[in-house]
Image: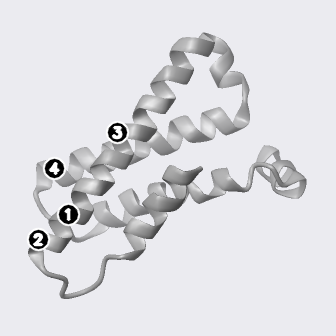
């Protein structure tokens, strides 16, 4: 949970006209968080095998991690930090906030529906 919160804070620290070094630092932190979330997903998949995909939240996490990684690959290939690719990548990262609400029964019902 702390990684999700810190990742969201890091994304919120970006602003227009920020110094290049500051932007590179934030991008490096975002890559570290992406690696942490990918590692978490891989550990769960290896540990739970096919049972991993029976849980709705695990499938959601899987989609968010894969979407984030695809977005990061597109950013790396294109070499730019603007446009649709960045928007999609950030959307997947923001989707992790929904994971924090999985303890709320009404959110769980809505999500499972």
Instruction: Give the distance between the C-alpha atoms of the residues marked 4 and 2, in whole angstroms.
Output: 17 Å
Coloration of the structure image:
one colour
Per the image, label 4 sits on a secondary structure element best described as: helix
x 89%, y 52%: residue = 105
Q: Which comes before the other along the chain, label 1 or label 3?
A: 1
Left or right of 112? Residue 74 is left
Q: Nearer the viewer, residue 20 or 80?
A: 20
Left or right of 36? Residue 56 is right
Residue 21's tag is 2
Mark 1 and mark 2 residues within 8 Å of each other at the beta carbon: yes
Q: Nearer the viewer, residue 1 or 44?
A: 1
Residue 76's tag is 4
Mark 3 and mark 2 residues within 8 Å of each other at the beta carbon: no
Per the image, label 1 sits on a secondary structure element best described as: helix
Q: Which comes before the other along the chain, label 4 or label 2?
A: 2
Per the image, label 2 sits on a secondary structure element best described as: helix
């Amino acid at each position: 949970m702390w990684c999700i919160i810190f990742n969201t804070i890091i994304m919120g620290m970006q602003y227009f006209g920020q110094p290049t070094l500051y932007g590179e630092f934030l991008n490096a932190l975002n890559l570290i968080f992406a690696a942490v979330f990918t590692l978490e997903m891989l550990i769960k998949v290896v540990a739970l095998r096919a049972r991993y995909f029976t849980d709705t939240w695990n499938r959601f996490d899987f989609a968010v991690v894969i979407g984030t990684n695809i977005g990061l690959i597109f950013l790396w290939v294109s070499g730019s930090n603007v446009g649709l690719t960045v928007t999609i990548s950030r959307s997947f990262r923001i989707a992790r906030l929904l994971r924090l609400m999985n303890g709320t029964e009404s959110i769980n019902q809505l999500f499972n529906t």
